[in-house]
Image (tube, grey):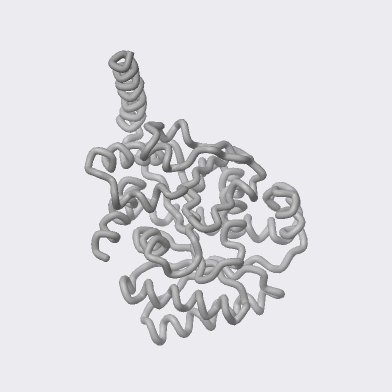
Amino acid sequence: MRDQAERLREKIENIKMKQLELVNNDEQSQKHAKILTVTSGKGGVGKTNISVNIAIALSQMGQKVIILDVDFGLANIDVLFGIFTKNSLVDIIHNDKNILEVLTDGPNGVKFLSGGSGVEDLIKLDRFQLERLIKNLALLDKLYDFIIIDTGAGLSENVMSFVMAADDVILITTPEPTAITDAYALIKTVSNRDKHKDIKVIINRAETSKEADDVYNKLSMVSEKFLSLKLTKLGFILNDDSVVKAVKLQEPFFLSYPKSEATKQIKTLAERLMQVEEIMEDNRGKGVKAFFNRMIGYWGKE
């Protein structure tokens, strides 16, 4: 019985891997998803909420979008979506599932995947396990236009590995002095390792557009003067009661309050991201496989 069960498992595994190979070897094999890493210097600045709503805005613009939640301490994409998910990256690494089996359907066509503890396990994988995982993840290039990676907050090595591997880093901060200080600390850490890293800044919960501009200008000035690193202004989201109401409903405000100021500002942010990516047609990092190889290589340097 044991031999029969083992042979059955091998057959199932072979079928799964053939499914992945068929998609990875299709006529669009040169297609690479655009990877956006969303991060913050401290928690509580609205990073995940912005990730979710930008994903929905991009989806409404005809883009295929997936969110990878790698905030190990406070993973809450599913909470904001009001959807329970039982699968994570761990199931690919340890439970022999493929990427197609672990994705969860979110609203408006957006998919999401929890990293769980799986990302921390990457450094421990043997060569076969790593190749299998990367082959799974590479499939996302063929299926999606945008992959939004929602990191944890702060300067841990897990967070920094995603930031340093990214083509595009979106840094979220608020006008609160502690948030600005922690955002600058993250910028400084990035600058010490790569002064050419492109960091796009979103100011969240500003009272006015002037306040948002003042916060960005202050961060930009000190970053360029003391770190020789130029920031990019992506935009802002003003304080809006609809955001709080939507969180309580466990619904994205983009869908619950489509006429709110916050929703209009998210649309503007998504449009700017689309414009940036249209300019960068070469897909600088060449997709998911290259991204995770860079991230794993970054760990190897530590």
- Residues 181 and 12: in front is 12
* Image location (x, y in percent) of residue 112: 52, 43
Task: Please name the residue shown 33% across and 53% down the image.
Answer: 285
* Image location (x, y in percent) of residue 97: 40, 32
Task: Please name the residue shown 37% across and 44% down the image.
Answer: 32
131 w.r.t. 217: above or below = above
Going by the picture, which residue comes out furthest to the front? 1
301 w.r.t. 62: above or below = below
Q: Quadrant of the C terminus?
A: bottom left
Task: Please name the residue shown 32% across and 46% down the image.
Answer: 289
For residue 239, which quarter of the picture? bottom right
298 w.r.t. 191: above or below = above
- Residues 139 and 230: in front is 139
* Image location (x, y in percent) of residue 150: 50, 55
For residue 43, which quarter of the picture? bottom right
* Image location (x, y in percent) of residue 33: 41, 45
For residue 245, which quarter of the picture? bottom right
Task: Please name the residue shown 54% across and 40% down the image.
Answer: 111
Q: Quadrant of the N terminus?
A: top left
